[in-house]
Image (tube, rainbow, N blue to C red):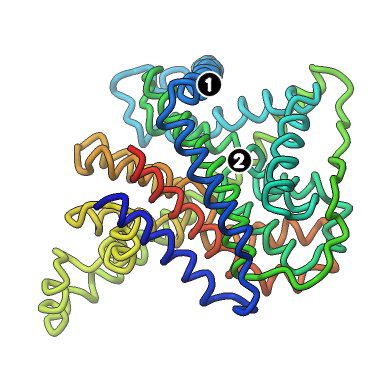
Amino acid sequence: MDVARGLVGMVVLVGFAWVLSTNRRRFPVKIVIVGLAMQWALGLIVLKTDVGKGVFDAIGRLVAIVLLGADAGANFVFGELAGDHPSVAWKAIVGIKIMTTIIVVATFSSVGYHFGVLQRVVAMMAVVMRRAMGISGAESLAGAANVFLGQTEAPLLVRPYISSMTQSELMALMTGGFATVAAGVMAVYVSMLAGGDVESAVRITRHLLTACLMSAPAAFVMAKVMVPETGQPKTLGEVQISADCKTTSVIDAATEGASQGMKLSINVLAMLIAFVALIAVCDAILIRVGQWSPLLPVVHWMGLDQLDLDGVLGIVFSPIAWLVGVDSAECRVYGGLLGKAMATNELLAYDDLRGLIASNGISEKTALIATYSLCGFANISSIGIQIGGIGGLAPDRRADLVRLGPRAMLGGAFACWMTGGIAGVLV
């Protein structure tokens, strides 16, 4: 039954993308078949084979070591505020955890980029996707980079090609950014969900990295269904990574990475403060409205104790929850997580997921599906981030970015949800 529901969910999500297509007569059959096959293959390798689990667990242990380093740095600067004292609650240290984790991961990423490690891995992944799906060199390179870099950093690798990209290539570039997350933010998710336990950190890293890898080909599926290729890409062959390494030494790379990490962490913290405040205001208004006597019967009929944002979003996204294999009793809880991730950002949704896991308010299977489904930047605020980031690299394409932004965000969300559905079938 779960397998059947998972397959139906994939068909429905691709169908949603087709309904939103700019040209429904040009359905990219090869890209859809190969992209979905790659998604399933990656899931099977990591979740069902000892070799796949072993490789990704090894990566997870490296991430766990990096997180220990982040904790050491945080403890040196912040002392008990970093979480060493039992009286310091998680909510009090979450900002410090986010900031230090992003800074440390950005530092190591910059060092890896300095030695050319990241570029080689991205280039190899791009070749596989380009040859398998028949996509252009520029979009495959950006899609592979999105697995490790953020939605505004990955386009830097194809900066010279953005101005000449077709509408379909630009859609793929944006959708890939929405369907995946940056390494620094992924490490924050690991820290949030693992709770300081090394083995949990290893396991969660395996799942989150797998989610990003699986969502990369899924993003191409959604992008090409929603905006089929009608032009002639100029980069049908292999392209070179354009972002030159400007650092002169390991120390230079480390300091540059730390500086960039600080800027990113401040941006993340600012977004969290803003959106938590917006949610609180929305909830206050909705609760007061829901207490209005004529509406009380409607609120209770909806199965809600009170009218709030989580309850409304849970109802709206419940059908998606059922499609990806979530048990009926947990559809509203899971739907609320999806809705919060799209309406605000995935960090708030992961924090809610952490609380649900800690209180046994969600089953292990649903928690795993949510872990995969939330692993992307597919939210409303990210539309502005991408328009500003990519538009700064190619100002002449800003109008196209504005037009494609909402559609690309939905495509990224569909890709993440489909990844979650496949994970639910395989566990």
- Residue 426: image quadrant is top left
| Residue 114 at x, y percent in the picture | 80, 25
Q: Nearer the viewer, residue 372 or 6?
A: 6
Question: In the rendered image, which residue does mark 2 sit on?
Answer: 182
**Label number found at residue 64:** none
- Choose mark 1 or mark 2, whichever is in front: 1
Q: CA distance from mark 1 to mark 2?
A: 20 Å
Going by the image, does 5 lie left or right of 133? left
Kindly identify the residue that appears in the image at 31 percent across and 57 percent down.
5
Among numbered discs 1 and 2, the one appearing first in the sequence: 1
| Residue 369 at x, y percent in the picture | 35, 45
Question: In the rendered image, which residue does mark 1 sit on?
Answer: 55
User: Image height check: is 153 above or below 324?
Assistant: above
Amino acid found under the numbered disc labelled 2: Ala
Amino acid found under the numbered disc labelled 1: Val
Q: For the C terminus, which image quadrant?
A: top left
Mark 2 neighbour density, 10 Å: few (under 14) some (14–19) many (20 or more):
many
Mark 1 neighbour density, 10 Å: few (under 14) some (14–19) many (20 or more):
few
Kindly identify the residue that appears in the image at 46 percent across and 17 percent down.
79
User: Image height check: is 290 above or below 244?
Assistant: below
Kindly identify the residue that appears in the image at 84 percent across and 40 percent down.
241
Q: Considering the numbered disc 1 on the image, is that residue within a helix, a strand or a loop?
A: helix
User: Image height check: is 189 above or below 402?
Assistant: above
